[in-house]
Amino acid sequence: MSVTTIRGRQLVRASSTGRWVQLLLSLAVLSAVVAWPSLATAAPTGHDAFLDTWARSDLPVAEGRVDRTWMWGPEPFTVPLREPYVDAPGGTRLVQYFDKSRMEITDPAADRASPWYVTNGLLAKELVTGQLQLGDQTFQTHPPAVVNVAGDPDDPAAPTYATFSSLLTAPALPIGSVVTQTLDRAGQVGNDPALARYGVTAALLVSETGHTVASVFWSFMNSRGTVYTGWRFREDALFPNPFYATGFPITEPYWTRVRVGGTPRDVLVQCFERRCLTYTPDNPPGWQVEAGNVGQHYYRWRYEQLGQPVQEAGVYQLATVTNVVDGDTIDVRFADGRTARIRLIGVDTPEVYGEVECFGVAASQFTAEWLAGKEVALQRDVSETDRYGRLLRYVWIGPYLFNEVLVRRGYAGVATYPPDVAYAGRFVEAQRAAREERAGLWGVCPVPPVGRDTEPAPPPGPAPSPSPTPTPAPNCDPSYPTVCIPPPPPDLDCADIPYRRFPVLPPDPHRFDPDRDGIGCESG
């Protein structure tokens, strides 16, 4: 295990090759986009381009739609930072660290549609060479990083990045040859013919660096699968091009024996410019090839070993959610003890006060499940408050922009009030995808009660809570007194609604309570 301290919090991270069992157990209990278990302490994402980059490869993993390694990690482990870079406007660039890499925006005015708008730096190369990059051609020389590349961080026998520093000019393996060469922490290269049983070969010679790529890594770099892009899940190449995430190889592949969760294992390691990849034959198929935790390793080297100053970017303000008023309104407490009511910008959820609207209770419950008691990041647009005195903010939690999550999952519609339109285009696209899929209220409510032209008045009182048993409105069937489900037609099944284990009264027109024990949709 490793421990990273940021903003006074200690975030514990398992080693890259050792955490797949924990992840599989976590994924097994996820059936949709729900609050990730670690979001109570996760640093929120700092830029919507970071969100899109993370979501493309890792949102399918977070939702349990695919069983494969993370390319970034479940969430950032630092707040957004400013790092010196002489070729960036103003001499600094926005960065944020994830377990497996660093995201960076060097030129905010560049083409947002380019896959290189967000880059991830030559972190592995810097760790191996000790050359801290501070500009396109500006470097600061330091010793290579004595940080384990793979396995448990405290394994005294595992190779470090410094181990590979003497191997940058090692000759390339012949194409097609079986990889059986070994490496120890001291940098001694050996050979173990028994490793031929794994069938790994040298697949491709990269002329730019004079190194080959191991067959298992080349297959991974060219793999296809479920990605999230354009607010939809689809099948596509995992990377825009094979070297997008890794850069070119800077070493040959080597087998090493490292501890993973305390157990010695054979692990193939190869370092590329941006990341080091590992292949653990004992892992399940989706987790055999993994990106090492180079983001953790680089952060530890740069800020803990080299003592570089940490500069927070200040793109948002952190607060703890103390009360969920309804789907789009929350109460928060700041670190200095101040409290405020927050109205989420750009979204509109159904009402739960007065006339309870279709899906209103569900939206309030969804927001409570995600945000209640959690630390969130509040980002301002143009306006400070609305006409009712509530702070207007975008809410980030972990890698997610929660305003957008509400819309994409069908718990809210778009409600745009200029001049606060920074993410209006995103929300419109998210709503279009939700409507096409009939997600949430779009598939249940006869007349979706969202997207109003005017902002509804807030509920009375200084800090009300959603009523646990709101009075059913005319479009809510009285057989289901604590949730709002319209009467038939159409006839609904449990799979069509977001509620579970709610009270049911006769005559139960949708037949949600077949065993007549007074509780509807008890499973699933």
Image (tube, rainbow, N blue to C red):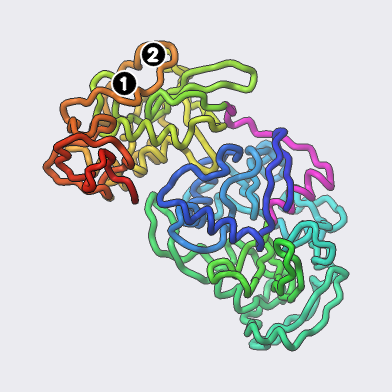
Magenta stretch: residue 444 in it? no
Q: Quadrant of residue 200?
A: bottom right
Residue ID at (13%, 40%): 488
Residue ID at (64%, 64%): 247
Residue ID at (73%, 40%): 5
496 lies left or right of 109: left
Q: Which residue is mark 2?
A: 387
| Residue 203 in view (yes/no) | yes
Mark 1 surroundings within 10 Å by alpha-carbon count, few (fewer than 14), some (14 through 19), many (20 or more): some
The picture places residue 75, in percent across and down from the top left corner, at 58, 46
Residue ID at (67%, 38%): 81
254 lies left or right of 477: right
174 or 343, nearer to the observer: 343
The picture places residue 403, in percent across and down from the top left corner, at 42, 35
> Would you say the residues marked 2 and 1 are in contact, meaning their CB atoms lie under 8 Å apart?
yes
Looking at this rendering, what residue extends furthest in the top direction? 461
Q: Secondary structure at mark 2?
A: loop
348 lies left or right of 2: left
Sequence-wise, the earlier of marks 2 and 1 is: 2
Q: Magenta residues?
A: 294-319
Q: Which residue is mark 1?
A: 455
Identity, as a three-letter code, of the amino acid under mark 2? Arg
The picture places residue 7, in percent across and down from the top left corner, at 70, 34
Q: Secondary structure at mark 1?
A: loop
